[in-house]
Amino acid sequence: MYENYTLRSMASNPYPRRTLYHRLLNYRESNKLFFRIETDSGITGFGCSAFDEEVTGETEHTIKKALNDIAIPMLLGENPLAYHDILNRMRNEMLQSPTAMASVDMALYDILGKKHNSPFINFLGEEGIVLKVASPLEFAL
């Protein structure tokens, strides 16, 4: 079972830097398409596509089309724990849909973590890993 739904949120100032450069990049709207996969055993995985046509060329319509026409048929009947093989096959088919691909990626990793009752970061193999959480703009600078 799967479903997707879209959330649009307005941000008063998502990038509160003071320079003109940062003000020019101050996006006021954030669009996200959430993707949910439910396995036969009842585990639910969630993924998210934060689409921006200017960045990836994707729109809500193109993401939904990629998910419905490519991802869902490729996922049906597959073992979600074989995520590596699924994602490798899917990448070849979804080259023009990186944001849609990311939502499937997240949902499969979410299922993996829930199946093993462990946060996904524990599967990365290193103790004491620190993940920085910041805006894409902050990562780019």
Image: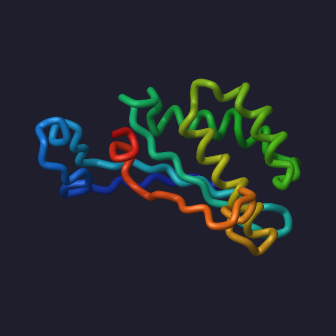
Give the residue at x 57% y 31%: 97
Tell me if residue 129 comes above or below residue 97 in the rendering. below
Label count reads: 0
User: Residue at coordinates 79% horizontally, 38% vertically from top-left?
Assistant: 74
Position of 71 compared to 101: left or right? right
Image location (x, y in percent) of residue 117: 76, 74
Residue nearest the observer in this picture, 138 or 14: 138
Quadrant of the drawing holding the C terminus: top left
Name the quadrant containing residue 98: top right
| Residue nearer the viewer, 104 or 65 | 104
Taking the spot 65% from the left edge, 39% from the top edge, the residue there is: 68
Coloration of the structure image = rainbow
Is 19 positioned to the left or the right of 29 in the image? left
The image quarter in which residue 122 lies? bottom right
> In the rendered image of this protein, does residue 42 appear above or below residue 110?
below
Location of residue 54 with respect to 99 vertically, above or below = above
Quadrant location of the N terminus in the rendered image: bottom right
Q: Which x, y percent locates residue 78?
A: 87, 48
Q: Is residue 139 rendered to the left or right of residue 73?
A: left
Of 105 and 33, nearer the camera is 105
Q: Position of residue 26 (x, y in %)?
A: 21, 44
The residue under the point 45% across, 46% down is: 50
Front residue (pair 141, 23): 141
Q: Position of residue 25 (x, y in %)?
A: 23, 38
